Image (cartoon, rainbow, N blue to C red):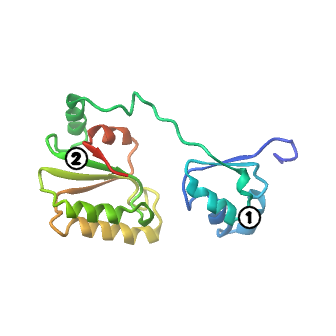
Amino acid sequence: RIKALGLPILVEMVLLDGDDPLKASRERLGSLKLRLLRDVDIWVGISGAFLPRVVAAGIPGARFRLVYPGVDLETYRPATPEERRGTRARLDLPVDSRIVVSVGAVIRRKGIDRLVNAWARLRPVRGRDLLVMVGPATLPDGLTVPDLAFVQTIRDASHAHGLEGTVRLIGKAENVHDYFRAADLFVL
């Protein structure tokens, strides 16, 4: 109906393997969905990782546009030491620890296992060092059942190798910016 009105159709992609045309083609009524998605005029993604999915679904790559999200420089500016301590107290994080924050879903594609392995190699000290992982880690947070096995391996690893008490999985959070402000270091 939109095409009949002569209006352009734009699709924003924000979750790789969640809202891309290749994933939609494998769902119930996937061939119908894919036929409709092939009529989309412009696909907009926040990562170049979406382009291969668009092309694999039979959509010309020329219809894909990469648009980086903007950053609010006031919200995401470095915190003063006083602000950092206050934010940590509000988040129930140790005020005087060295805190490393990572933000992203606890899924294999994000490399969380490599992060935990690197953390173990640093030999963190309980009470002094804390790795805080902010992002979906449960079904209610938005993970799929297959992802949960990976989350469990991360939980197991964070309790082994001398890491007890130095790793904290926060889960999905609406106040991600607060965790950035609480961090001494951000790891992506």
Residue drawn at x 81%, y 45% is 2
Q: Amino acid at mark 2?
A: Ile
**Residue 125, numbered label:** none
Residue 121 in percent (x, y) is at 21, 64
Which is more N-terminal, label 1 or label 2? 1
Q: Quick check: 24 left or right of 69?
A: right
Residue 87 in percent (x, y) is at 25, 35
Q: Secondary structure at mark 1?
A: loop
Residue found farthest to the right: 4
Residue drawn at x 45%, y 64% is 109
Residue 19 visible somewhere in the drawing: no
**Residue 58, numbered label:** 1
Residue drawn at x 15%, y 66% is 162
Q: Which residue is mark 2?
A: 99
Is the residue marked by circle 1 packed among few (<14), some (14-19), or many (20+) residues within 10 Å? some
Q: Between marks 2 and 1, how big is the CA–CA gap? A: 45 Å
Residue drawn at x 18%, y 46% is 98
Residue 159 in percent (x, y) is at 20, 66
As drawn, 170 above or below 123: above
Q: Quadrant of residue 169?
A: bottom left
Q: Quick check: 188 left or right of 88?
A: right
